[in-house]
Amino acid sequence: MIPDMDRIWRKFVLFGLVALLSGLFAAPAAAAPITASQTCHASADAGETSRDQGRAPQRWICSPEAYDIGPQHLYLRFRLTDAAQPRAQSLVTHASPFRSITIWVVDETGAVRTGHYTSASARHLISGPMMVLPLPQTPARPRLITARIDQPWHKTIASEARLDSAAEGTGWDMATVVAMAAICGMLVVPLLLNIGFYIVLRRPFVLWHVVMVGLMLVQTVFATGFIHIAADSEAATEISISSLCLGAVAASGLMFLATFLEPEALSPRLRRLIVACAPLVMAGGVFTALPVEALRPWSALGIHCAVSLAITLIVCGLINAWQRGSKLVSFLLVGWSPTLIVGVYRIGCYLLPHARPTESVVVFQLALAAEVLANSLGIVIRFLELRRERDLATARAAELEGVAGRDALTGLWNRHSIERRFTDLFQLGYRTMAVVDLDHFKRINDRHGHAVGDAVLKVVATVLAEDGESCAIRMGGEEFVLLLRGPGGAERAERCRRALSTRIAKSVPGLGHVVAASMGLVEHDLAGKLDVEFAVLYSHCDRLLYEAKRLGRNRTMRERLTGFTPDQQLRTA
């Protein structure tokens, strides 16, 4: 196990070093972005040509707003009039799917050169989520550069486009590359920590955080362009994987919110709504990832709408938990606030017509790192709290067990002791009660004697006491009570009942028939908000037991109760 972990750590350290070195070699000092004197954009349908665009100046928008990818073509125009700037050598833009890009370069003498590029021919930088297209070379300095993007899938391919003085393009500076590589490393530590927590404490919120952090790491590798250190993938593949991961991160974030906070921190209706909407959020990521041309104009809207829904539910959940006095919500507020703010900003920039679409990759990844660190601290606190509660519950149960009266034959608690201490056990979470009665036990005593009957009862006591999260009680004769806590109490009780026949036959041979048992089981108020007396809950179990006997024995009748009316008859099946 340790050697495997060492190899994993070495790979991640190597990954960070490669990312760092890529920053050193991907940003030559002589290269720099070029600021055009005027940058305009326009959209055109499939039948329109570049000349048609040139004859319609009113269609050009010379401000960073109102980008439209609905039509088949999106034009960009850069006008260069500052002779003091370096010569433009390449077009750099955000890595995004497209079918083809055609570039026309007009130099100062009027000479025109044309270049045509497909998605496969675009070169991707390893120092940022950008792709580079070299400009066609002209005899003199370029003064007008026009690019036609065919079938663009995202607005950022135009809104983040710029000219560069290096033919190989310029990516992030070294400081940004180092920061992004550090974030990848920061995500690995909480991921391994949470996996360790889940091994010790198998709670759903730990698992959901493991899924969330793992997907964040994958999304970060693709969103930062670091994936090109190891693989040469096209923009369409990167965007699809990144969208799937982002949708899954948002969905798992909802599930983490619903399971991490205290049971009483969210209203039941809001908790159910959050859980029910998680698949819808995931579906938004799937929609954006689909490479279907008919969906192209609305593809990016899928993930933005899905994340908007997730943000709305998370904000409502945080407010609701704060109003209900949750002690854990402060960690989520600190961790999620930067991510929520950046997420709203990104969505607003994309959807609002007068805003400039931007991915804000660096700020978003920094916000994700802050979220992971704050939530991981919250998980540590929650982990310690659950361990303390479990230790306290175990200690109190052990204390009660030590002073309680015991049945002389089986060593289990007797009826008198459980009646006195039932309220304490109920508050400790023992809210599932099962009454177990052996079928036709009198035959054993009549045919084989009371000594054999006593041996059978001891086997029953042993089987019922094996569940570590239950308390077994002998009520008298062949009747037993089983109190259970934790998830799946009813199923665990049923497994105990079914195991009785096999264990009795193995431990007490020569009976001549199978000894079975009937059971009446009630699950009451698993959320922990209602109280009930032992006699009331026992009477319901006893009624279900006799119903099982009446229907033929060797079976279980069960109910889930939500409360009791004064006549003790309110129930739900």
Image (cartoon, rainbow, N blue to C red):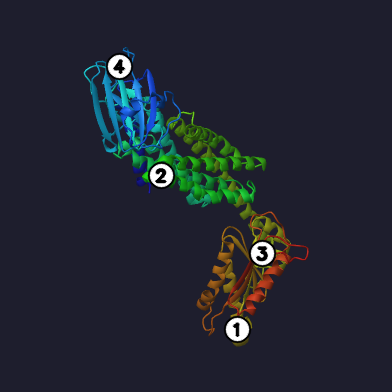
Residues at circles 2 and 3 in contact by the CB criterion of under 8 Å: no
Residues at circles 4 and 1 in contact by the CB criterion of under 8 Å: no
Work out whether mark 1 precedes mark 2 in sequence or the reverse, and give the earlier one: 2
Question: Mark 3 against mark 4, which lies toward the viewer?
Answer: 4
Residues at circles 1 and 2 in contact by the CB criterion of under 8 Å: no
Say which amino acid is labelled 4: Pro
Q: Where, by quadrant of the figure, is residue 535 drawn?
A: bottom right
Question: Mark 3 against mark 1, which lies toward the viewer?
Answer: 3
- The span from disc 3 to disc 1 (Cα, nearest Å) is 37 Å
Q: Which residue is mark 2?
A: 295
Asked which secondary structure carries label 1, the reply is: helix
Question: Callout 3 environment at 10 Å: few (<14), some (14 to 19), or many (20+)?
Answer: few
Any part of residue 353 in sight = yes
Query: Is 182 rendered above or below residue 83?
Result: below
Q: Which residue is mark 3?
A: 572
Question: Mark 4 against mark 2, which lies toward the viewer?
Answer: 2
Work out whether mark 4 precedes mark 1 in sequence or the reverse, and give the earlier one: 4
Q: Quadrant of the C terminus?
A: bottom right
Question: Callout 2 environment at 10 Å: few (<14), some (14 to 19), or many (20+)?
Answer: some
Which residue sits furthest top?
84
Work out whether mark 2 precedes mark 3 in sequence or the reverse, and give the earlier one: 2
- The span from disc 1 to disc 2 (Cα, nearest Å) is 73 Å
Say which amino acid is labelled 2: Leu
